[in-house]
Amino acid sequence: MDSKNKKIIFTVSDRQKEDFKIRLQYDGLTQATFFRAVMAGYLDKDGDMMNFLNTFKENNGIHNKEQRKKVL
């Protein structure tokens, strides 16, 4: 198995990037630390993360209520 690290890239608006960097600085986090923490919470099915995602899905019409229950 290849143990080489991979990059994950996506785009955001200039304003989102600026606001994000300001919030990270306020919280004393780097972008890498933030995204690794979010990824770990998601992969570990952390209860707070799953509740956040369930609310996000509901508010954005992703999956129906029955499908969201199955994911938990």
Image: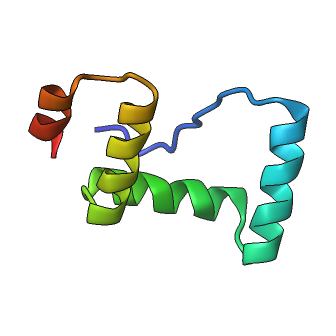
Up the image or down, 54 lies above or below 57; here it is: below
- The residue closer to the viewer here, 28 or 1, is 28
Up the image or down, 47 lies above or below 15; here it is: below
Residue 37: x percent and y percent?
49, 63
> In percent of the image, x 84 and y 51: which residue is there?
19
> In percent of the image, x 35 and y 23: which residue is there?
62
Image quarter (top left, top right, bottom left or bottom right) of the N terminus: top left
- The residue closer to the viewer here, 39 or 69, is 69
Up the image or down, 49 lies above or below 10; here it is: below
- The residue closer to the viewer here, 57 or 18, is 57
Which color mode does the image show?
rainbow
In the picture, measured across the screen, residue 27 lies left or right of residue 9, that is right
In the picture, measured across the screen, residue 23 lies left or right of residue 53, that is right
Residue 18: x percent and y percent?
89, 48
Residue 71: x percent and y percent?
16, 38
Residue 12: x percent and y percent?
75, 30
> In percent of the image, x 78 and y 63: which residue is there?
23
Question: How many numbered badges does the structure rendering display?
Answer: 0
> In percent of the image, x 27 and y 23: which residue is there?
63
Quadrant in the picture for residue 13: top right
